[in-house]
Amino acid sequence: MSVSDLMSIQDTVQQVAEAISAALGVETEIVDDRLTIVAGTGKYRQRIGTKEEGGDPAAGFLYGRVLRTGQSFVVEDPASDPTYDPRSITGEIDEQAEICCPVVVDGRVAGVMGLTAMTPGQREFLLTKQREMLEFLHRMAELLASKVREHHAMTRLSVTSGQLATILESIGEGVLAIDEEGFISHCNRAAEVLIGLPRRELVGRHLSTLWHDSPMLTVLATGRGYREREEMYQHPRPAHFLVTALPVRVEGAVKGVVATFRAFSDVRRLVRSMTDTRPGYTFADIKGTSPALLRVKEQAMQVAASDVTVLICGESGTGKEMFARAIHAASPRAAGPFVVINCGAIPETLLESELFGYEGGAFTGARREGKPGKFEMASGGTVFLDEIGDLPLHLQVKLLRVLQDHVVERVGGTRPLPVDVRVIAASNRDLEQMMRDHEFREDLYFRLSVIPLHIPPLRERREDIPLLAEYFLDSQRRVVPKEVSGFSRAVLETFLAYEWPGNVRELQNAVEYAAHLTRGPTISVEDLPPRLRHRGLPAGGGTLRDQVRRFEASLIRACLARYGSGSGAVDQAARELGISRASLYRKLRVPGHSPRRTRATGIAP
């Protein structure tokens, strides 16, 4: 049986699947017109070469319907859809949603591309972005179709010089035609640009004088071509290409090689430009008017314009990644990628290859052509190293070299690769104590903390709590199937009294919990998570009188925050609270706290 169109370019298809999955954070599966899995990520990668839906497009399941009708489909609940997959009958479905579309080549459906949600969060992302995801899938399908057509054209090449020149110039990628002795006989304009030399210096030149030991020359000797191989060259300037090299045969004899190549980042950049659907936070998206928050926002905005390394510290849930994204968005690198690496979430055995990449054959199970690391993928943009305190000591040394020399060395590699990235790191651990305990390198710490930013915990900016609670409730009003008007006074008092060990993230979760469970239009204390109902008590120690006065002061600050900075804000707050203006000022003088004047109201907080 002949190889299917998609299987004939399997390496390309797999790279597209991995790029899609990395950009969107969902799993990707691509099957051909025989329902053979050609490429995939996650669990689908382990099943490449096997059949979906029993290999029968007429069985009536999802991919078969796509192949027969040429239509796209969105499945919102696979577990309850008996036409989704044969596993629906046995209840073995672990997919939570799927969006798929056909790959059409010259009017014929050559395969199916599917985006699959495996978690509730991924499901919500896919379903709320249905239109964008379908549009993106169709564009990726068009990309694969164009690669299939290019493959067909390359396999039909004739050595007639006029025909060859026309075909080579019409291809948008770099093209080199190499004769049987290894000399370049033709190149197109794209090749000139990618290599960095004019045509007159390329044509007639032996390939070995341009790229020593190029695998393209082995095709002349062996007659065996290759597709989508990653190759790196240093002359005339450092270059990182994906190369396809195929032999040109005349009556069975190899008479030359035609090679197409493109910058390694092309597919990655294309995917990123169409799939940058994660929140592009700006500083305006970081909500709060407390002096503590405004101070750190101002510092972050000042450092955004430069390439200086930033270390963001703060408790879990304070919004460290939001700050990192806002810095990236306000920087000259905003058009480049923002790559997140959670140093604590990736197994230590995989972390080095994920960060720095690996060469082909570097270890058992490694891809033959190797794989770039996150630093290479972030070229031109920003790398965000979350939970940097969890980075093993032996990798701290390699990271230090990236920061100092701006190069990475792949696992199994022998040559450094230049990288152009800005590094922002974050940690909720005490890195200085870790240095004293010899768990974190001192030289790396000082290299990372050129500009340290400390994000205050929510309990240190309680005046932001009512604003944040209302903001989170407003976002829930779009998804809950009922009218929720707001919070009762007792709920706001509970929010202000609670210590929030999970910070802003915990507040958001509490508001979402209450918005879904409340039975009335106003959220009451009974609607809150149990931990808040039982622990929403004034904290801070001291006598009962001191604790009551601190609690009163928190309520007054929250009330002032709602009324803003107008001249009548204090009077309005006093009227709402049922106290005089003088009493309001007096109750704000909390024991053990030096009065400061707020920017918004000019009164001591």
Image (cartoon, rainbow, N blue to C red):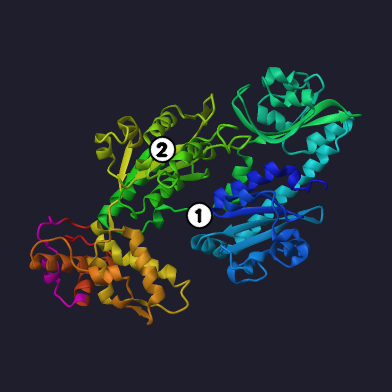
The residue to which callout 2 is attached is: 306
Q: Residue at x 29, y 40 (%)?
A: 431
Amino acid marked by disc 2: Ser
Left or right of 175, for residue 454: left
Q: Residue furthest front?
A: 90
Up-down relation of residue 271 to residue 68 (above or below) = above
Left or right of 459, for residue 283: right
Crowd class of label 2 (few under 14; some 14 to 19; many from 20; radius 10 Å): few
Q: Residue at x 24, y 39 (%)?
A: 433
Give the quadrant of residue 218: top right
Q: Residue furthest bottom?
A: 520
Amino acid marked by disc 1: Arg
Query: Quick one: quadrant of the C terminus?
Result: bottom left
Q: Residue at x 18, y 57 (%)?
A: 597
Residue 422 percent across, percent down from the top left: 44, 38
Residue 60 percent across, percent down from the top left: 73, 68
Find numbered disc 2 in the image and state the secondary structure of the residue it sits on.
loop
Q: Earlier in the sequence, mark 1 or mark 2?
A: 1
The residue to which callout 1 is attached is: 278
